[in-house]
Image: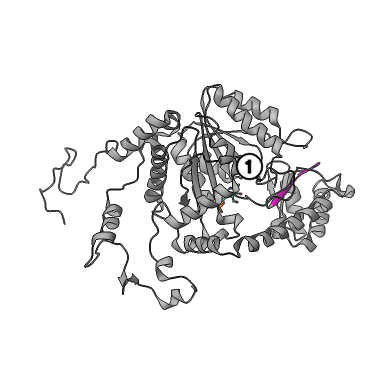
Amino acid sequence: MQGKGSIRLPAERTSDHAPTMIPAPALNPLAQAANQALAADCPVVFDLLSERGKRFFFPAKGILAQGAEAKTKATIANATIGIATSGGVPMHLGAVHQHFAGLDPREIYDYAPSYGKPELRQAWAKKQREETPGLGNHPISTPVVTNALTHGLSVVGDLFLNPGDDVLIHDLHWENYDLGWGTRLEAKLHTVPLFDRNLTGIAMQAFIEALGRFKGKKLLVALNFPNNPSGYTPTKAEAGAIVNALIAAAEAGTKLVVTVDDAYYGMFFDEACEKESLFGRLAHAHNNILAVKIDGATKEEFVWGLRVGFLTYGVKNGTPAAYKALEDKTAGFIRSTISNVTQPGQSIVLKALQNPQFRAQQAEKVAILKARAAVTAVEVRKPEYADAWDIYPFNSGYFMCVRVKGTTAEAARQKLLERGVGAIALGETELRIAFSCVEEAQLPAVFAHAAAAVRAARGG
Ligand SMILES: Cc1ncc(COP(=O)(O)O)c(C=O)c1O
């Protein structure tokens, strides 16, 4: 306990019982150092940071650093760690341990670093490089582990969005973007149509015009392919056009954070899809474009509940010092909010990545989804359903979406539910069907029910 009188009390304190106000700290020297590194090497990236992002740093000189130092130097006893150990391993209960097989207690119970397990970060970085040849040898940051993609998106928002900042996002997008960046961080989300009027492909002109409205300003552009909810991935030509439009905007002076949400990466069912993440080109496209890859094991590796995702940064003039500053700020957010990400989740994903069977097992599951997508494509396009909906293009991911005719998606959803089939209503007229969680044999009935539900909803 701190003895009375041994610390200088702020002037606000009027009696022994009044709360002590801790003055707001000045910018921490570690934040200053990170900011200076960014301002020196990537001045635009520094400008893009939110006020909160500018304040953040990783407390490398606190408890964590002392613990790390003790790990190598405390040869007699290490009394630094905030866990309980016995016989050199974390203490654990039989009632818990019986549920784990094949993992060492250290791989389950010990804390993971705030940046994530180093071996997992390296393994994921290797996977990203292999899958993204467009990166070439361009340096990018080492991925920082997040509590899956939702958390990654949330941290990106914290780092780059001030209240009132502009975000450009496709009209068809995962609704949690609104909650995280709009409701929580008070950014202004502007939507641009994903598809052209006839639903033949991406509405490129609309995207180019929308970018033009923010000329010379700061803008966060959110990309997500395979897209939730439409299940669409751009063709190679469309992907090139998106990247070129962003480069043209950057060239015109717009300062861009481009988030590339690769949640459904690898679930491509059509040869025409661009199979490489747009991050590959954006990460070294222009000094005015900070590309942020948000990806993870959740959907790709079929481990939704394990909560393992990654945040990775790339910018044309990126340097080791600038990337370290971004990694430190990211890990600082993690330390301040959740401290670190689940150890068992990270250990299992790492072991899976190292398992020689892993890729083949994953491909088997993707093939099942591809077969379902093929059946879906036939069923949803049956001429007898033409009165019920228009079909948004789909070629990848977990979902597809129809635009119901003559009624609302919510009314159709209610009627569909009465028939014992669940689907998601989005916006006025979009009904999302997740073929990822419907057996192939059930798909024809799902679409027959859906068409009947649309007709029932419009009263005929
Ligand atoms: C486009 C998109 N991004 C991110 C997420 C979040 O994924 P996670 O479960 O890894 O947080 C989802 C989940 O539905 C999603 O559809």
Which residue type does callout 1 highlight?
A: His
Image coordinates of residue 451 in percent, x first then y, are 82, 51
- The quadrant of the picture occupied by the N terminus is bottom left
**Above or below for 91 versus 252:** below
> Does the closest atom of ligand 1 sit within 8 Å of the Cβ of label 1?
yes
Horizontal side of 64 relative to 298 (left or right) equals left
- What is the secondary structure assignment of the residue under circle 1? loop
Q: Residue at x 79, y 34 (%)?
A: 198
Let me know if residue 192 appears in the view.
no
- In the rendered image, the vertical position of residue 440 relative to residue 95, given as above or below: above
**Does 420 sit left or right of 251 as displayed?**
right
Rendering coords of residue 330 (x, y %): 42, 45
Q: Residue furthest front?
A: 137
Residue drawn where x is 46% and y is 52% of the image: 145
| Residue stretch in magenta | 399-407
The spot of residue 311 in percent (x, y) is 49, 46
Residue at mark 1: 173
